[in-house]
Amino acid sequence: QFGGGGSGGSIWIAAGALTGAGTISANGGRSLGGGGGGGRIALTAENSSGYAGQITASAGAGGSAAAGTIVKPRLVIAVQPPASVAAGAAFSLQVAVQDEDGTTITSDNASVFTIARATGTGTLQGTLTKTVSAGVAGFTGLSYTKAEGCRSGMPSLQAPADDTP
């Protein structure tokens, strides 16, 4: 006669810096007929040391539903570009989505990376946005227009079109 509580849903946060002290939650609903399962939270931030809040994805009260998952993936340059290349010469690099333990999240086939130069005044050329396959995106055929030092910045990560991490 009583329906169960709803599940916690999904939250995707991608930020350069996460600060503050609020609560981020995807908790399951509660009901006399049983609690809903916790949701999923994926938090990607280059710097979250300024965040003093709480992150929860717990099961709703009133039943035996399971807790949700909290994933804090990090973005890494897995294969660095060469230290120097001639102007216009091709080079490559590889980026990956990893968990907190440094393991590539091979189930990720939806995250989208965009790379850019962090230093230098030339133009980074080639395909600069890629979707990962098994948590990894390889950027090949890149080039830089000037004979000067250039460093790749941390890749940015865009939420996939369906907003599921």
Image (tube, helix red, strand yellow):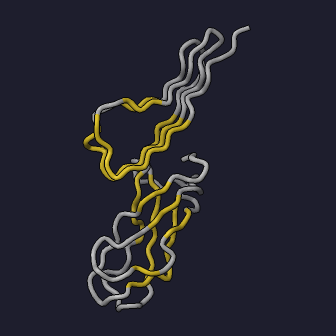
Quadrant occupied by the N terminus: top right
Image x and y of residue 151, in percent: 30, 74
Q: Position of residue 46 (x, y in %)?
A: 33, 53
| Residue at x 54% of width, y 37% of height | 10
Observer-nearest residue: 26 or 97? 26
Rendered position, 165 above or below 86: above
Query: From the viewer's perspective, is residue 92 above or below residue 49?
Result: below
**Does 140 sit above or below residue 159?**
below
- At 41% from the left and 90% from the top, the residue drawn is 89
Look at 43% across and 29% down and name the residue there: 56
Residue at image position (48%, 38%) is 41
Give whichever of 93, 4 is nearer the camera. 4
- Residue 15 located left or right of residue 163: left
Q: Residue furthest right?
A: 1
Task: Place residue 119 in its image quadrant.
Answer: bottom left
Query: Residue 32 appears at what percent x and percent y?
Result: 62, 8
